[in-house]
Amino acid sequence: MPEPAPNQILYPVFAMFLLVVVVLNRLRSLRFAAVGRKEVSIAYYRAYQGDEPEALRVVAHHFSNLFEMPVLFYVGVLMTYASQQVSYWILGLAWLYVALRYAHSYVQLTSNDVRIRFGAFVASSIVLAVMWASLLVQLLRTG
């Protein structure tokens, strides 16, 4: 079976970017609404001192999370692409990682069930580790 086109490994990155945009827009909408309802003062956003409603804190924290572990995903994808090691296995892992991050986001931004959210986080972390290990093995094989 021939290997996938190298550019295919970049599509999961676009899907992650879309997730970031969706979460950012959700946060923006919630913040504008909270200021409009006077649940939070616009002055809060000058230095982020004081209290923000819990619903906003959850989304803001989640938005920040999208720039933590996913950074390792982006680097792994770019290394895979640059080293020409794109395989269906790594491509599948990349898409699985993205799907698990979407699931994690959905849970955190809806029910926020910590057990389910933690499960999605752990699963995505394992997939990411397998992706990195697979890339290392492929690089060692090709010398």
Image (cartoon, rainbow, N blue to C red):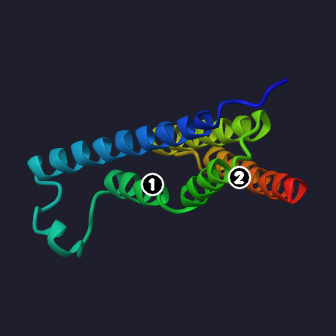
Instruction: Name the residue at 50% across, 45% down.
Output: 108
User: Which residue position holds label 1?
Assistant: 62
Instruction: Name the residue at 35% across, 42% down.
Output: 21
Instruction: Name the residue at 47% across, 38% down.
Output: 14
- In this rendering, the label closer to the viewer, 1 or 2: 2
Q: Dot 2, how many residues are within 10 Å of its Cα: few (below 14), some (14-19), or many (20+)?
A: many
Q: Position of residue 103 (x, y in %)?
A: 58, 37
Q: Quadrant of residue 8?
A: top right
- For this view, does 55 lie left or right of residue 52? right
In the depicted view, which residue is nearer to us: 48 or 100?
100
**Count the marks: how many?**
2
Q: Please tell me whether residue 89 is drawn above or below residue 140 in the rendered image.
A: above
Q: Please tell me whether residue 7 is drawn above or below residue 43 in the rendered image.
A: above
Q: Position of residue 42 (x, y in %)?
A: 10, 62
At label 1, the amino acid type is His
In the depicted view, which residue is nearer to us: 128 or 43?
128
At label 2, the amino acid type is Leu
In the depicted view, which residue is nearer to us: 126 or 109?
126
Instruction: Name the residue at 15% across, 71% down.
Output: 46
Q: Position of residue 111 (x, y in %)?
A: 50, 39
> Quick one: SS at disc 1?
helix
Q: Quadrant of residue 139?
A: bottom right
Q: Residue furthest front?
A: 143
- For this view, does 1 lie left or right of residue 5? right
Q: Earlier in the sequence, mark 1 or mark 2?
A: 1
Q: Please tell me whether residue 30 is drawn above or below residue 11 in the rendered image.
A: below
User: Which residue position holds label 2?
Assistant: 128
> Quick one: SS at disc 2?
helix
Say if mark 1 contacts mark 2, CB within 8 Å: no
In whole angstroms, how far apart are the C-alphas of marks 1 and 2? 19 Å
- For this view, does 34 lie left or right of residue 51? left
- On residue 42, which mark appears? none
